[in-house]
Each structure stands twice: as C-alpha cells, then as structure tokens.
Amino acid sequence: MNYNRNTSLSSLKVRYHNKVITGVTFNLLITLWGILVGSNLLFLLLFLLWGNMILYSLFKLGERILLFAYGVAFYIFLLGRDCLEQFFLYPSDTPFSDKLNNHAYFAMICSIIGVWVSFSVFCRRYSKSNNPNKIIIGSDYLYKSIRKYSKISFYATYPFAIIINLVIGFFVMRYGYYSYYTDLSGVIAQSPILYLFSKLEIMMPASFAVFMATLPDKDEFKKLSVPYVVYLIITLGCGQRSTFLLGLLLFFIFLVYMQQIRPQEKWFSTKYMTYAVMAVPLIAIGGSAYKAIRFGNDVSEFSVTENFCRFFYDQGVTSNIIKRAYEYENSIPKQEDPYTLEFLHSGLPARLLGNEVYQGNNLDHAYKGGSFTHSLGYVIMGNGYLMGGGTGSSFIAELYYDFGYLGVLLGSALYGFIFSTITNFKNTSIFTKSLSFIITTQLLWAPRASFSGFLAFLFAPSTILLILFIFGTSYVKLSLHYRKQHLGNAR
C-alpha cells in the first residue's frame, strides 16, 4: 500500500515538473522571440497571457475544455492578424498608430484576465461543492423523449437548412462575396419561402444542441453528426467560415465532455488532438484557396505558405474593430440602452418591452437600433453602410465603449462565470444542459460579435418555439406516462 502511494506521489511530481518546464520554456521562447523581432511589448504580454491560458487549459483539458475552445476562437478572431504582424513582420494592409494598437492590446489583456480568473475561481468553487462522480440524469423516460423530439426537429429542419445554404452559396458565387452583405438580406426578405427557410435553419443547430444535451451513446451520436458535418461543409460555400469553425469546436467540446462522463466508450483520445492539429493547416489553406477562386484571383500564383498565413490574417481582422471603435469613439451615436444590451432590441425582449425592431442597414437602425455593429458601420463607412456594407463588432469594443476598461474586465469575468457554469453541466438538469449547448457557439463567437449575442439567439422566436416544442411535448408525454403508471398501479 505504501509502495502504491509513493508511486502515485512520484507520478504527480513528475507531471508537475513537466508542466513547470513546459510553461517556463514557452514563456522564455516567446519573450526572446518578441524582443528579437522588436514586437510591441503590450502585445507580447497579451500573447503570453493567452498562451499561458491555453497551457492551463491543456493541463486539465477534460475540466477546462470550454476555456480552451474559447482561447482558440479568441486567437482566430482577434490575435491571428496582429500575431503575424508583430512576431513575423507580416506586411499590414491597415496600419494603425501606436495609440490605437496599445488600446486594443490592453483591452484584450483585460478581457483575458477577466475570463481566465473568473473561470478558475468559479470552477474551483464548483469542484469543492459538488460530487465529481455525480451526474444528474433525471427521468430516463424524459431524456429519451427529449432525445426523440430533438431528432425529429433536426431531421424536419435539416432539408431547409441545406437548401437555404445552397441558395446562398449559388448567390455568392454568381454575384460575388460582398453580395452576401449588401444584397442577400434584401433578397431573402422579399421571398416568403426563403425567409421561412432561413428561420427554420436557425432551429436545426439548436435541435442538434438539445440532442447532445441528452448525452446520447456514441453510435446514436454518429448517426446525427454525419449530416450535421455535411451541413457545416456546405456552409463554407457561402463564404462564412465561422459557422464551420465554431461547429467543429462544438464537436470537440462535446467529445471531450463525453470522454469524462463515459470513458469506457472512448469518445476522445490524444490521437484526435493530433488529427485536429494536422487539419488546421489544411482548413486554413483550403479556405484561402477557395476565397482566391471566389474573387477570381490567378490560382497559378497560389502559395501554400502565403495562403496559410492569409487565413489567420483575414480571420483576425476583428482586432481592427476594437481599434476603429476607439478611434471613432466620439462619433458613435449614444443610445437609450447600452450597446451591450443589444438583445433587448430583438426577438422576444423587444416585443415585451415595446422596442421597435429595425431591419437592414438604415439610419434608424444605426441611431436607434441599439446595435453597435450598425452604429459603428455607419460612422466608419457612411454611404457604404447604407448600401449594405458593414464592419462587424466585438464584445470587447462594446464593453469598452459602454463602461471603459473596467467594463471589459467585469464583462469578460461574466463570460468566465458562464463558461464555468457550462463546464459544470454534469450537475445540472436536462433543460439547463440544453440551454448551455445552444448558446456555446454564440459565446465562442463573441470576440467577433456582440456581448449579448448569445441572449439574442436564445430569445429569438425560432429558438423559443423549438424549445417549447421539444420540452413541452416531452413533459406532456411524461405526465401521461406517469398518469398511466398510476392508473395501472391503482388497478
């Protein structure tokens, strides 16, 4: 017994020493490289913080998978472009002053600190208060019923999701990439059929999320995951790589979660991580190549290295939003509600509060719609915005505009708390699990979207109708099932 105890302690010491060596080596190499190439010191600090957060997540991936996935999304959407410019002297197509760069880097530092510290604190509290081996399953009949109706919803909405994305892909291929932003919304709004299909498409990923929340067995998950992956691949034809990337991250999160819950089924192993790392350059190069073809560029000049870098450079453009928002801070119109509460101006909240819901690019939307995306887009682009163009947003830019650096820190801490709560999903009800999976991709999208985007998605009429259908039908069936059992026992 003492021998086994000593062996266990020795193994723990070895693992701890390996972690320390890995962390020290990473920090030294990055610091030396940053100094050697003359990178911005604030960016160097930002990258070190991000890198250490990733290492922290990897050391206990099963317990910190959501933080890891968020770190990946944070790099793709915010850090990739500046990383190439600062560490590899990649030529910038939109140079900014040191003042604007430093603001963006400091705001992102505040954000990472907020998310990381909050996640760590609340995860530690959950681990002390909960039984790690306890999984709240509830009624087996209820789980099976919710799984059944989530599958029905998935298959019922799936054809419409495929059709609308094929239509969008054809539209983009024929009229150009920018037509997605300038003309497509008008075309869909004018066609009742396409508008209906676009709303049904929203239900399909949400149905898949509810299905995952029921913790299906591996074989059942495979049957539904294949058509979902096909859907993700088709979305690439629309020129929107974010849906594909976020979908893959959701898959990754779920596989790691299930490995923790049912290790005997072998949901995830280190070889999957190897495959994922190997797939990154293929996705990056393929995505950039498709973009080159889509814009009619000469493919004979195709460079593997250049297209690999270009993928991260293009995806990381959101860091420019933080800089532009700071540059035009005094020109952005003030509104009744903070921009971080944009969800109050769409879906069910807007209807309950009597807020007018604005559609499309127009002055009313820019000045009254509560949308930072539309307000900033109009300030920067002017008539270009009114013609359908846009800039996008970032939850960091919104938090800073509304509440300053402290707001970025506290708002990001709220995200960290939400991540820790979702990570603790084993100890929650099926309804809470479902909501957690439904909003996961929206939370990962936040570096490139609005702060309350996940709430806007959750309170969208399409999402609410789906939840009411799946859970309403399931609870009615459960009630009838119990009633039947009670009558049977009475006899």
Image (spheres, grey):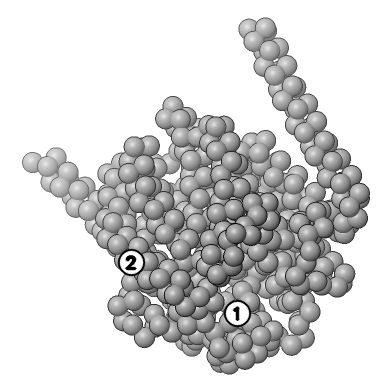
Residue at the (39%, 57%) spot, across then down: 231
Quarter of the image with the N terminus in it? top right
Residue at the (50%, 50%) spot, across then down: 248
Viewer can see residue 119: yes
Return the residue found at the far front: 300
Left or right position of 323 against 200: right
Write down the quadrant of residue 312 in the picture. Answer: bottom right
Is disc 1 placed on a helix, strand or loop?
Answer: loop
Quarter of the image with the C terminus in it? top left
Q: Position of residue 301 (x, y in %)?
A: 64, 60
| Precedes in sequence: disc 1 or disc 2 | 2
Q: Position of residue 81 (x, y in %)?
A: 72, 61
Q: Residues within 10 Å of mark 2 (few under 14, many from 20)?
A: some
Q: Position of residue 314 (x, y in %)?
A: 65, 64
Return the residue found at the far left: 491
Write down the quadrant of residue 468 in the picture. Answer: bottom left
Q: Which residue is mark 2?
A: 163
Q: Is residue 51 above or below residue 475?
A: above
Is 222 in front, or is 282? 282
Is 296 in front, or is 141? 296
Q: Which residue is mark 1?
A: 390
Q: Is residue 218 above or below residue 393?
A: above
